[in-house]
Amino acid sequence: MLGYSICYAASYGFARMGWYLPSGGVLFLAAGYLYYKDYHKSGNLVHLRGVFCAFWTGGQAMACLKLSNLQSSWSLLTWACFYVALSGFWWTYELADRLLGEEYGRRRQAASGSARPLFRCMEAVTVVSVAAFVLEASVLKYIPFFVKGVPHAYSEFHLSGVHYFTVSCVLVPSLAVLFFLEGGSRRRYRNVMAVLMTIISLAIPILCVSRFQLIFAVLLACFTFGAYYRRMSPWVIPALFLAVLPFYVILTIARSHDVAYLNGIFEMKNSGMPIFISQPYIYIANNYENFDCLVEALPRHTLGIRMLFPVWALTGLKFVFPYLISFPLYVTKTELTTVTLFYDAYYDFGIFGVFVFSCLLGLAAFWLVNALKNGKSQNPMWYVLYGQMAVYMMLSFFTTWFSNPTTWFYFAVTGGMAWYCGRDRGRRW
């Protein structure tokens, strides 16, 4: 952490002088250093602390480059919040590891007999997801992929309470990964069905024109594989991104997001920058700008109401008491509404909330890493849960995962499947 702190102070100093390239450059070095330390110690490409440090700090490094006219100099309080977000996570994990942990490196214990319940879980989730999608399409009378000229067709494709079940399809590819890693079935038709269910689960995000759900499903499957088989090649993730890229482009076109439309929103300083660079840049960098907007404009803290949104949403209380969700979103531009993982923590309790929340995340990451090495991985759902956490750590720059009801719905579904897999542990069939 000493090296990170020195790089962070240097980045802040460079930013104050308007030297944005070195400001971002030193943070890129810090991100790579922190990730390498955890990877070198554990041999785990998807080590949760390493993933969080790499992508949270790497995202901030991109934001420090200030390549868009939407970006401005951050306040000192914003810099302090970003620092305590990482340091709270890192030190909590480190202290827990020193006091309670063991050397990470024990070989995984085979979860023998897990193929059958995994197949049943795949069947259940696929059937429920398809049924929910058909219900939404029938009631709303359209499928977003076939709607032309409406950029926000996906955001309106939503029946309250039903859409959670529709998007549960993203869990199926990770279940398929575990199914085949556990040996699959002796019956070829079941293996074929597992592949077909995976294809269907990936088709639903495409039909919904949801680039995020498609990427989430692929990342979750990849990280689940990495949690189960830690000798995963470092080239797997880039290869999967290249495989998903054509679908991402198709969905961008299907959402009526042409180059002129996107360039008009992004306001890049270099108007000639290719869209395949400016789009991912702004979708990462501007989230940190939105956090700074919040710090500058927030009149008062909401004392927990924002982070309890999953409770208001999943219980229906948001319809009974609308004021529970009637707080403005402070962003640089109305079209760019993604925010960082710590946005709601600051909204509720300021920098103290950011620090406490980051410490809790560090403790949860430590618990999950140790759960896999201490034999609890006999239940295959631990790998899916680990994969979900890895995705949230990787995309920590993207949104407030833990005040999103969909996240908790995924956790609940995973917990239900874990209970079922723990009961149905027969031989391979």
Image (cartoon, rainbow, N blue to C red):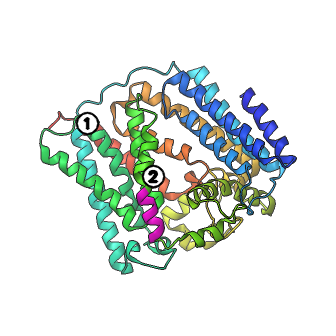
Q: Which residues are magenta?
A: 246-254
Please tell me which residue is depicted at 68% across the width and 64% down the height of the picture: 271
CA distance for labels 2 and 1: 24 Å
Query: Tag 2: residue type?
Result: Phe
Tell me if residue 223 can be seen: no
Along the polypeptide, which appears first: circle 2 or circle 1?
1
Where's residue 394, x and y in %? 55, 44
- Residue 346 relative to residue 73: left or right: left
Please tell me which residue is depicted at 54% across the width and 31% down the height of the picture: 366
Element under disc 1? loop
Query: Tag 1: residue type?
Result: Ser
Whether 332 is among the magenta residues is: no
The quadrant holding residue 335 is bottom right
Compared to residue 379, the image places residue 73 above or below, namely below
Element under disc 2? helix
Compared to residue 190, the image places residue 180 above or below, namely above
Q: Which residue is mark 1?
A: 114
